[in-house]
Image: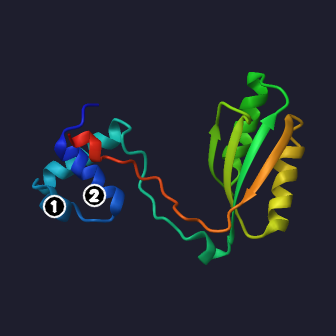
Amino acid sequence: MSLDSYDIALLAAIQQDATTPQHALGAQINLSSAAVNRRLRKLADEGVTRKTVSLVDPASVGYALTIITEVEVENERLDLLDAMRRSFLACPQVQQCYYVAGECDFVVIMVVQNMAQYTELTRALFFESNNVKRFKTLVSMSNVKVGLEVPLDALGS
């Protein structure tokens, strides 16, 4: 999909606050509410926007720790990798998972209530899979920046 300056401005605005009413978005970017509605629908239909969510502060609901885990697999057979992907997708504590090139095969970012819960997850996700060669755990001492906003500044030029 080709994005024009209105689409980019609209995406920037909804990344900041997706609850902004369409008439307010229109006023911000100089479009009618109907035009904003059409564009938002098209951006969703084209897969540019995937879903609208509210960001919950993990610590405020009892998930005090952010864990980053590097996982090295034993075997890179597609069926085994797919099984690992499915286990990561099914785990609610896994917030992000990346299949990567380099020294490890997956990088998994998760939130847990405590180290006991992480220990349980290591058993379920890593030890029981029979395809994890090793994993390295990094515990975040401070979440300096957490977000999924896509930088749109350069697209408008």
- Amino acid type, label 1: Gln
Residue 36 lies, with reference to residue 119, above or below; the image says: above
Residue 18 visible in the displayed image: no
| Residue identifier under label 1 | 28
In the depicted view, which residue is nearer to us: 23 or 131? 131
Label 1: few (<14), some (14–19) or many (≥20) C-alpha neighbours in 10 Å: few
**Nearest the eye: 74 or 34:** 74
Residue type at mark 2 is Ala
- Local secondary structure at mark 1: helix
Q: How many marks?
A: 2
- Residue 18 lies left or right of residue 55; in this view the side is left
Residue at numbered disc 2: 13
Is residue 143 in view from this perspective?
Answer: yes
Q: Residue furthest top?
A: 77
Q: Is residue 100 above or below residue 27?
A: above
Residue at the (79%, 29%) spot, across then down: 80
> What sort of colour scheme is used for the picture?
rainbow
Quarter of the image that includes the N terminus: top left
